[in-house]
Amino acid sequence: LCLHYRDFIPGVAIAANIIQEGFHKSRKVIVVVSQHFIQSRWCIFEYEIAQTWQFLRSHAGIIFIVLQKLEKSLLRQQVELYRLLSRNTYLEWEDSVLGRHIFWRRL
C-alpha cells in the first residue's frame, strides 16, 4: 500500500513519486472513484498512469471502487473511465453494516 504522506520522497517531483513509489513497487492499484476523484487532476493523472501500467504488464491490475453514487454528467467528463466502468465489474461501497461486510469480503 503506497501512501503519499508515508512513501513519497521529499524533494522529488510528485509525478516521479507517483510512478516510482506508487506503480513500480505495486502489484495492484485500487482506484477509489468519487466526485473528488473525477474533479482532481492528480487523481486522473494517477488513473491514466495506472491504465498504462496495466497495459504494459499485460494483466488486470486495477480494482475499481465506486465510493458514492455519481452524476452521469460528471462521470462522462472522463470518457475513458466512464466506458471502463460501463463495461467492467467494480466494487461499490455500501454504508450499511451488511453492505460493508460484503464489500470487504469481495475486496
Image: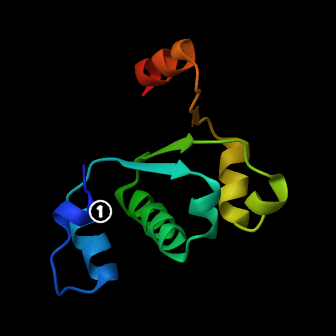
Q: Residue at x 46, y 16 (%)?
A: 101
Residue to which mark 1 is pinned: 23
Task: Report the number of discs.
Answer: 1
Q: Residue at x 56, y 32 (%)?
A: 93
Is residue 100 toward the left or the right of residue 66 in the image? left
Q: Tell me if residue 72 comes above or below residue 17 in the rendering.
A: above
Q: Residues within 10 Å of mark 1 (few under 14, many from 20)?
A: some
Q: Position of residue 3 (x, y in %)?
A: 26, 58
Secondary element at tag 1: helix
Could you say which quadrant of the image residue 99 lies in? top right
- 87 or 74: nearer the viewer: 74
- 23 or 58: nearer the viewer: 23
Image quadrant containing the C terminus: top left
Q: Residue at x 72, y 42 (%)?
A: 69
Q: Position of residue 52 (x, y in %)?
A: 45, 67
Q: Tell me if residue 106 comes above or below residue 53 in the rendering.
A: above
Q: How is the image coloured?
A: rainbow
Q: Position of residue 63 (x, y in %)?
A: 47, 43
Could you say which quadrant of the image residue 20 lies in? bottom left
Q: Residue at x 50, y 21 (%)?
A: 100
Q: Is residue 22 visible?
A: yes
Taking the view exactly as shown, the residue that stands out farthest to the top is 98
**The disc labelled 1 sits on which kind of residue?**
Phe
Q: Position of residue 98 (x, y in %)?
A: 54, 12
Q: Is residue 24 visible?
A: no
Is residue 106 toward the left or the right of residue 8 in the image? right
